[in-house]
Structures are given as C-alpha cells and as structure tokens.
Image (tube, rainbow, N blue to C red):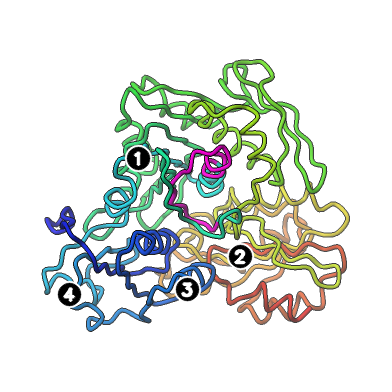
C-alpha cells in the first residue's frame, strides 16, 4: 500500500471524493458534509437515487474525471474502489502529493472513531440486513450511526450521524482501492457481525469460489474473542468457516442445533407473519412488510444481534412492524392501469431466483413478468451462464436485455443473453431477448395486462426503464 494511503492529516477541512456517486461513496460524502467538512466530488455517470441525495445535500459533483478538478488546496482525497491507478484525477492527486485514503479508511476515521462497529457481510442480503439492524437500533432509541449501500425509506438516506454508541456498516468483500486490493470489510473491527451467505461473485477480482471463501475466512479470523458472529448455518461453506473460532458464534437456520430458527411463517399481503425460536423454544412472533423467506433470514440475523445488544422483544417487534424497507429492494415504483412496476437490485443468479420466488407468493392474481439486465462484472461473464436459466422458474414471462457494457468484457468470457433466452425456452418458460431498453418498453406496453407485476431487476439505472414504462402505460 502506498504510504500516502494510510495518512489522514489533522485539521482537514476540504475533502475531494473521486467516484462519488457509488452508494457507499455517496453516503460518505453526505456524512462528511453533515460533519461540516467542505465536500466536492466527481464521477463519470450519475443517476438516482444517489445523485439526488448528493444534490439535495448541496454537494458539488463535477462531471467526468479531469485532472484540473484536483487542486493543491484539498486537504484529503478519498479514492473510490472503481478508480484505477491511471485515472487522470488519481494521477494528478499523486503529482500534487496530496494525502489520500480509501473509503473504509475515511469511514473509520471520521464516522467510526469511538463507536462500536456492527458489520454485516455476505454475498446476499447485506443491504437489507444492515438497514433492518439500523432501524431496530433507531426505533429502540439507541441513536445509531450507519453507512449502508442503499437508501433506507425510513430515513430517505443511506447514512446517518448518530450520538449513540453503535455504527452499522455494510461490510463489502469487494476490493478496497487500487492501492489496497484487500476486501473492504477487513478494515473494520466489529463487536458483532453477521455472515448471511458465501457464494461466488465479483468474477472480475475473485478467480473462483475458494478465493471468495478465503476473503471471508480472513474477516472471521480477524474478529476478537470478545466479539460475536451471527452466521447462517444452512450453508456448508459457512459451517466450515465458523469451526474452531475464538469469537462467539451464534448460528441461525432451520436445524435443531441452530441457536436461532425460523418457525411458522405465512404471507397475508401486505404483511408477512413469522415466528422465531431461540434455543429451540418459541421466542417471539413478528409481522413485517418484507416479502420472501430470504428476507425472514435477514430479519432473524438482525434480531439476533439486537438481542445480544440488550434490545427487548417488544422494541424489536415494534421495529419490525414499522420498517419500510430499502429503495430498489422490491420497491413498488408505481401502478398504471392495474399493472404494478417493481424495482429490485437482484443480479446474482441466487438473488434473482429468490426475488422471483418471493414476489410469486405475494402477487397471486396476475402474472409475474421478469425483466432482467445483466450488468455487473460477474453477470456479463459466462461464469453464470448455466445458472441463470434456473433462476426464472417462478416467472410467467421473461424479458432479457443484451448486456449494455459487454464491450468491457473479453470476447471469450462474455455472457450471452440470447443463449439464456434459448435455455429458458427449453425449460418451457416464455422468454424474449431484446437488444435495448426501448424494445423492452415497446413490448411491455403491448404484453402487460391488469393485475400483472412487472419485476425489473438490475444493479444499475437501466435507462430509467421504470418511470419510462409507467409513463408509457
């Protein structure tokens, strides 16, 4: 690591963030603004909700990466992990010998100092689980600080500066910065952590599942004996990872040996009712507006941490009822002519499968129309080509877009949306391939019927398909 990356000087006033429109970097920028720093940033692409968050906070965002944006009067530069070493602004930063650091380093220094960290990790469910834990703490009067990779509807923000003792952090296994290729979560020292799942993802930085597993192994190995790890024990990989650890382990799952277990649960729209067993005995009955069994697992892990912090059952129950969710996680964007348009961040094959399965149990009168844009570095690669056909079984109609950034992937590694559609048809699913978003909208205007749910899944802006489709309908 470069020596400059470790050093955050005293008396910092002016801070510049390169690649500020990522969810984590955007949250950090707003938090720094609330702490009375002068904040400026830049990015190549800007789209809601983070762009709106920054605009409402009055943070200047410069368009594009231009060396002239970086001047000698900045006290600190925070470098996002999307920034390469040859980024023009990073080059100018080094030429001027400006102090710089990564996002996790800035979080620890400016937001986490003196706080007790609660870190949520895992391939899936990090954002929802982090948001739920933050809301439980807030609802119970613990006044938490948090930085999370999604906009919490209860706060209309993905960050908060609180005066309480806890900070909730979404712990990402993705690399930290060009000068620090280790996972972001290795920068955090939690008193309690959650491990939701371990699957292969981020094919651009992890060569295989073993490399992913090793990253989580490093995280758990770094936890102190005084800390607690709440781990999903239905995963064979996680069961292996949690063996013989010095920290306290609390398991959650369905096995008789699980410390926390999901009991009876049922859907009664708009509510989901569920029971939780602790040490084999009924501990509490809850209701939530979250959809799907995967979200009940997320809830159990957050509840288990809250219980270790001394938050009472009635306080947790109230929080579960009043939790409004996260934008872009099964978020209803609108309803026109009886057709509901839902936005979801799902992109990994497992996340797509569980999301389709979840909404199928809630929307029973009409069809589920699944619209998917492969856009991540992993989903645009062939690594999941054979997995995606198994992810859409609950859908009645499927629309697959051609990956919009496919030119960034070597030809021999590219994912094929056309092949996915062919495989879906072989499985008896009504699937269609589209070269662009306009073609999908034109198709849906004709195909969608009253009582249908249009489930749009992408980790990007998807060319504003949600509002454009609603306007067209």
The residues colored magenta run 133-151
Sequence order check: which comes first, mark 3 or mark 2? 3
Secondary-structure class at tag 1: loop
Alpha carbon separation for disc pair 4 and 2: 53 Å
280 or 383, which lies in front? 280
In the foreground, 331 or 217: 331
Decide: is 245 above or below 170: above
Between disc 1 and disc 2, whose residue precedes?
Answer: 1
Q: Secondary structure at mark 4?
A: loop
Q: Residue at x 75, y 77 (%)?
A: 443
In space, the residues marked 4 and 3 are separated at their CA atoms by 36 Å
In the image, which disc is placed on residue 419?
Answer: 2
Classify mark 1: residues with Cα within 10 Å, few (<14), some (14-19) or many (20+): some
Q: Judge the density around disc 2: few (<14), some (14-19), many (≥20) Cα neighbours within 10 Å.
A: some
Real-space Cα distance between discs 3 and 1? 40 Å
On whether residue 141 falls in the magenta region, the answer is yes
What residue did someone put label 3 on?
405
Q: Is residue 66 magenta?
A: no
Q: Which mark is residue 115?
A: 1
* Sooner in the amino-acid sequence: mark 3 or mark 1: 1
**Label 4 belongs to which residue?**
73
CB contact under 8 Å: marks 1 and 4: no
Query: Which x, y percent locates residue 65?
Result: 31, 79
């Amino acid at each position: 690591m470069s020596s400059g990356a470790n050093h955050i000087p005293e008396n910092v006033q002016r801070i510049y963030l390169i690649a500020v429109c990522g969810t984590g970097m955007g949250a950090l920028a707003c938090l720094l603004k609330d702490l009375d720093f002068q904040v400026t940033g830049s990015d190549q692409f800007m789209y809601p909700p983070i762009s709106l968050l920054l605009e409402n906070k009055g943070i200047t965002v410069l368009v594009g990466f231009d060396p002239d944006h970086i001047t000698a009067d900045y006290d600190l530069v925070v470098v996002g992990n999307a920034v390469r070493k040859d980024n023009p602004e990073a080059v100018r930063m080094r030429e001027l010998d400006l102090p710089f650091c990564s996002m996790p380093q800035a979080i620890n220094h400016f937001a986490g100092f003196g706080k007790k960290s609660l870190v949520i990790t895992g391939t899936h469910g990090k954002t929802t689980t982090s948001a739920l834990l933050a809301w439980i703490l807030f609802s119970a009067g613990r006044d938490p600080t948090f930085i999370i990779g999604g906009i919490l509807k209860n706060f209309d923000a993905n960050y908060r500066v609180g005066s309480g003792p806890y900070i909730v952090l979404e712990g990402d296994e993705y690399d930290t910065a060009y000068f620090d290729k280790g996972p972001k979560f290795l920068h955090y020292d939690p008193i309690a952590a959650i491990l939701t799942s371990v699957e292969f993802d981020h094919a651009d930085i992890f060569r295989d599942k073993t490399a992913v597993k090793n990253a989580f192994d490093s995280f758990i190995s770094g936890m102190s004996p005084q800390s607690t790890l709440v781990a999903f024990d239905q995963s064979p990989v996680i069961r292996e990872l949690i063996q013989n650890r010095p920290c306290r382990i609390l398991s959650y799952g369905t096995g008789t040996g699980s410390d926390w277990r999901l009991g009876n649960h049922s859907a009664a729209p708009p509510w989901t009712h569920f029971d939780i067993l602790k040490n084999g005995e009924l501990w509490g009955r809850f209701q939530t507006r979250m959809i799907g069994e995967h979200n009940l697992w997320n809830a159990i892990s957050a509840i288990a941490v809250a219980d270790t912090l001394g938050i009472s059952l009635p306080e947790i129950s109230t929080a579960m009822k009043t939790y409004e969710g996260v934008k872009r996680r099964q978020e209803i964007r609108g309803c026109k002519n009886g057709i509901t348009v839902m936005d979801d961040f799902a992109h990994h094959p497992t996340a797509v499968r569980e999301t389709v399965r979840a909404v199928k149990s809630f929307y029973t009168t009409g069809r589920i129309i699944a619209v998917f844009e492969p856009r991540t570095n992993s989903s645009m690669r062939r690594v999941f080509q054979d997995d995606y056909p198994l992810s859409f079984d609950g859908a009645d109609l499927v629309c697959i877009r051609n990956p919009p950034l496919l030119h960034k992937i070597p030809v021999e590694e590219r994912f094929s949306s056309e092949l996915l559609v062919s495989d879906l048809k072989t499985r008896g699913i009504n699937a269609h391939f589209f070269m662009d978003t306009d073609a999908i909208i034109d198709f849906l205007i004709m195909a969608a019927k009253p009582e249908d749910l249009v489930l749009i899944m992408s980790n990007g802006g998807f060319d504003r398909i949600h509002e454009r489709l609603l306007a067209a309908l």
